[in-house]
Image: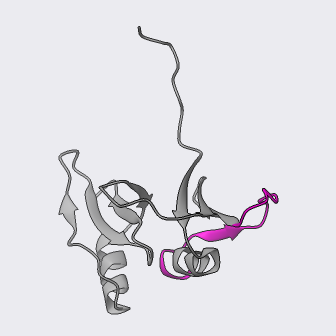
Amino acid sequence: MTTTVTPYGVDHVAINVPDVPAAITFYTEVLGLTLNGTRPDFGFAGAWLDAGGQQVHLIELPIAPNVGQHFALLYEDLAAVVAELRGLGYEVSDVKPTSAGRLQAFISDPFGNGVELHQHDH
């Protein structure tokens, strides 16, 4: 059965982290996201981070084993981002082209969540 449902974008992704303050530090100070202070009190620890017009939601819960799941953040100059992160001592994969003509590299947050670093045009 085919539907006519058509999303026009991704609003947010949510990831589990065991330490919200440490995750906020990594995602804001290392990957450049911005803390969004509008998150209501849901009765559990978490945070909302802005990444362009989308958000990353941090939820303080145990981490699922990483078997390939990840989300991607867009950057304008991926080579410069990778060089800067490596210069700060972070382990980042080599930049590789995708079959769609884009560029990608990967990093893990301090808790093992996979993050793809992505560039559309190169």
Would residue 77 be found to the left or right of residue 4 on screen? left
Residue 112, image quadrant: bottom left
In the rendered structure, does residue 40 fall within the stretch colored magenta? yes
Residue 80 appears at what percent x and percent y? 33, 78
Residue at figure coordinates x 30%, y 83% from the top left = 83
In the rendered structure, does residue 111 fall within the stretch colored magenta? no
Question: Magenta residues, as a range?
Answer: 29-45
Residue at figure coordinates x 53%, y 59% from the top left = 15
Residue 16 appears at what percent x and percent y? 54, 62
Residue 70, image quadrant: bottom left
Q: What secondary structure characterizes most of the magenta part?
A: loop
Of residues 53 and 57, which is closer to you in this image?
57
Quarter in which the C terminus is drawn: bottom left
Would residue 35 be found to the left or right of residue 116 on screen? right
Q: Looking at the image, is 17 positioned above or below residue 97?
A: below
Residue 12 appears at what percent x and percent y? 58, 49
Residue found at the very far top of the displayed protein: 1
Colour scheme of this structure image? one colour
Would residue 108 be found to the left or right of residue 96 on screen? right
Q: Looking at the image, is 98 positioned above or below residue 63?
A: above
